[in-house]
Image (cartoon, rainbow, N blue to C red):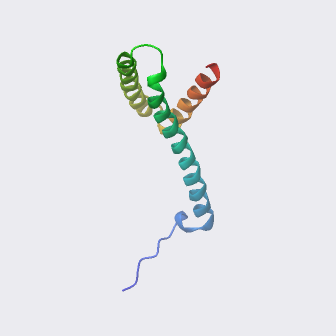
Amino acid sequence: MEEPKVKGRCCGPAWTYKLGVNLMLMTAVWVAASFNYYLISFYMKYVPGDIFVNNSVSCVAELAADLLSCLFVSRLGIKKSFVGSFILAAVGGICI
């Protein structure tokens, strides 16, 4: 029995190169975002004030961010909301 051959745009070397570049970029972005997320969580014990209040405020802020991100993705699309969130994070990091 012969295996079906896939015809179309998904089999050329240019498509494979583009897929590899996208994979590397998304891996780098994922690693950076995960590192920052967990670094903030570990840093919460050094923030002045009561650790329980700080963690509660962090939890409420994260819940609000999750709900807003769902709204942004449904309204703007994944690409625009992703780029916008990273621009906002960069501006916030520069302001700090």
Q: Is residue 46 left or right of residue 56?
A: right
Q: Is residue 32 above or below residue 46?
A: below
Q: Is residue 13 above or below residue 89?
A: below
Q: In this view, does 53 lie to the left or right of 18?
A: left
Residue 17 horizontal/vertical position (percent): 62, 61
Residue 34 horizontal/vertical position (percent): 48, 39
- Name the residue furthest bottom: 1
Q: Residue sitting at 54 percent across and 49 percent down? A: 27
Q: Which of 54 and 89 is in front in this view?
A: 54
- Report how many numbered discs are placed on residues in the image: 0
Q: In this view, does 34 lie to the left or right of 2?
A: right
Residue 71 horizontal/vertical position (percent): 40, 28
Residue 55 horizontal/vertical position (percent): 38, 22
Q: Residue sitting at 36 percent across and 24 percent down? A: 59
Q: Is residue 27 left or right of residue 56?
A: right
Q: Residue sitting at 42 percent across and 77 percent down? A: 4
Q: Which of 96 and 11 is in front in this view?
A: 96
Q: Residue sitting at 53 percent across and 30 percent down? A: 85
Q: Is residue 3 above or below residue 41?
A: below
- Name the residue furthest top: 49
Q: Which of 83 and 3 is in front in this view?
A: 83
Quadrant containing the C terminus in the rendered view: top right
Quadrant containing the N terminus in the rendered view: bottom left
